[in-house]
Amino acid sequence: MAKAKEVTILFDSSHCTGCKGCQVACKQWNMLPSPMGLNENKFTGSYQSPMDLNGNTRLIMTFDEKESGNKFQPLNFAIGRRSCYHCTDAACVEICSSGALYHKENGVVAFDTDKCNGCTYCQSACPFDVPRFRKTDSRIDKCTLCFDRLEEGGVPACVKTCQPEALKFGPREEMIRIGKERVEFLKKKGFDKAELYGEHEMGAYIPSRSASTVTKPTGFRPIPSPTA
């Protein structure tokens, strides 16, 4: 039997509109609750909400917001995506004391909730601070890349809902090829610092078989001022 191809999500921040539809889709598909109490969601002055991952939030879009000095567009945004990278040599898998975290053949770092003993070793070991402790059942939670959808031939919920196609999913080799082509396109458009992240970075944590790749344009992307 042939070995399953490793899969990846490609996030292209130059296409992302910051709608956060992926966050909503993630919560809906995985039935993850959100705070519903009066004033329970504190306003921080940022479009980023919530401000960090937690036991019931596996994915957030990050907003690095800077004043632009332009009265028509007072803020410039650098939009990012924060979730599990599904590392090949995953520290969380190596340190998991109960065997709850494990690799699937397609590279996904999956976990068995029933085996989790809540030790939080994985939370300490992860270089990206992704696994989060959930107090309601004393277990860890993180992105599973919607492996239940993958097993039925589908794609992750976040990818399915992404309207501007900033998120793409498929075999890792193909996603890297698309990412590199996009980087070259961005550089030709003046984004000279555009880069593909996740092919070789972080040594053992994100080597050439990582399950997450990201394209990043140059810094902030201002919106042109309206003209008469």
Image (tube, rainbow, N blue to C red):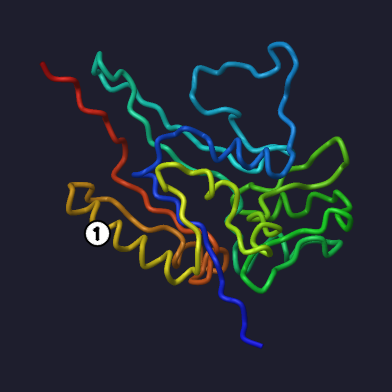
Amino acid type at image mark 1: Glu
Q: What is the quadrant of residue 101 in the picture?
A: bottom right
User: What residue lies at 82% left-to-right and 60% top-to-bottom?
Assistant: 100
How many numbered badges does the structure rendering display?
1
* Residue 8 at x, y percent in the picture: 52, 62
Q: Quadrant of residue 199?
A: bottom left
Nearer to us in this view, 52 or 127: 52
Q: Mark 1 = which residue?
A: 184
* Residue at point 55%, 44% (across, down): 82
Residue at the limit of the structure toward the bottom, as seen here: 1
Q: Is residue 221 above or below residue 155?
A: above
Q: Residue at x 19, y 22 (%)?
A: 225
User: Mark 1 packing: few (<14 Cα in 10 Å), some, or many (20+)?
Assistant: some
Is residue 18 shown above or below 156? Answer: above
> Which of the image's four quarters has the C terminus?
top left
Q: Residue 52 at x, y = what percent?
A: 61, 34
Question: In what element is the residue under mark 1?
Answer: helix
Q: Residue furthest left?
A: 228
Q: Would residue 46 be found to the left or right of residue 224 on screen?
A: right
Residue 148 falls in which quadrant of the image?
A: bottom right
